[in-house]
Image (tube, grey):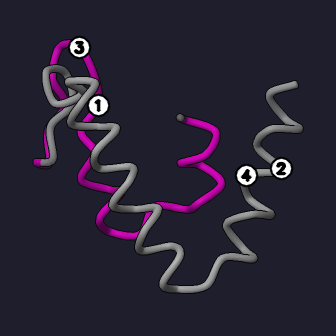
């Protein structure tokens, strides 16, 4: 289920080293770019008609919220 997947993802994130987290962040950026997420999302402090801003991610949005949102 979605809740189980979120729990497993959070456990894996908590167990990851800082270096591993950095690698995962880089991989996430590639996924974001390759799937054209920037067509709808912005990284500035304003929402678009299609999707919310992602600026809070850079300001340390709670990991649980990010996992649930994705």
- Which quadrant, please, contains the N terminus? top right
SS type, badge 3 = loop
Can you identify the residue that label 4 sits on?
A: 9
Residue 7 - label: 2
CA gap, disc 4 and disc 1: 23 Å
Residue 61 - label: none
CB under 8 Å between discs 4 and 3: no
Residue 52 - label: 1
Magenta span contains residue 51: yes
Mark 2 or 1, which is nearer the eye?
2
Q: Which residues are magenta?
A: 44-69
Structural crowding at the residue carrying mark 2, measured as other residues with C-alpha within 10 Å and reported as few (<14), some (14–19) or many (≥20)? some
Can you identify the residue that label 3 sits on?
A: 50
Does residue 64 appear left or right of residue 2 in this picture?
left
Mark 2 or 3, which is nearer the eye?
2
SS type, badge 2 = helix
CA gap, disc 1 and disc 3: 7 Å
CB under 8 Å between discs 4 and 2: yes
SS type, badge 4 = helix
CA gap, disc 2 and disc 1: 24 Å
Structural crowding at the residue carrying mark 3, measured as other residues with C-alpha within 10 Å and reported as few (<14), some (14–19) or many (≥20)? few
What residue is at 55 percent from the left and 35 percent from the top? 69
Does residue 30 appear left or right of residue 69 in this picture?
left
Among the 4 quarters of the image, the one containing residue 49: top left
Q: Position of residue 6 (x, y in %)?
A: 76, 43
């Amino acid at each position: 289920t979605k809740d189980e997947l979120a729990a497993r993802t959070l456990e894996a994130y908590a167990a990851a080293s800082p270096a591993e987290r950095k690698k995962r962040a880089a991989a996430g950026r590639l996924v974001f770019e390759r799937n054209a997420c920037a067509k709808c999302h912005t990284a500035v402090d304003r929402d678009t008609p299609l999707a919310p801003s992602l600026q809070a991610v850079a300001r340390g949005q709670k990991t649980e919220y990010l996992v649930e949102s994705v």
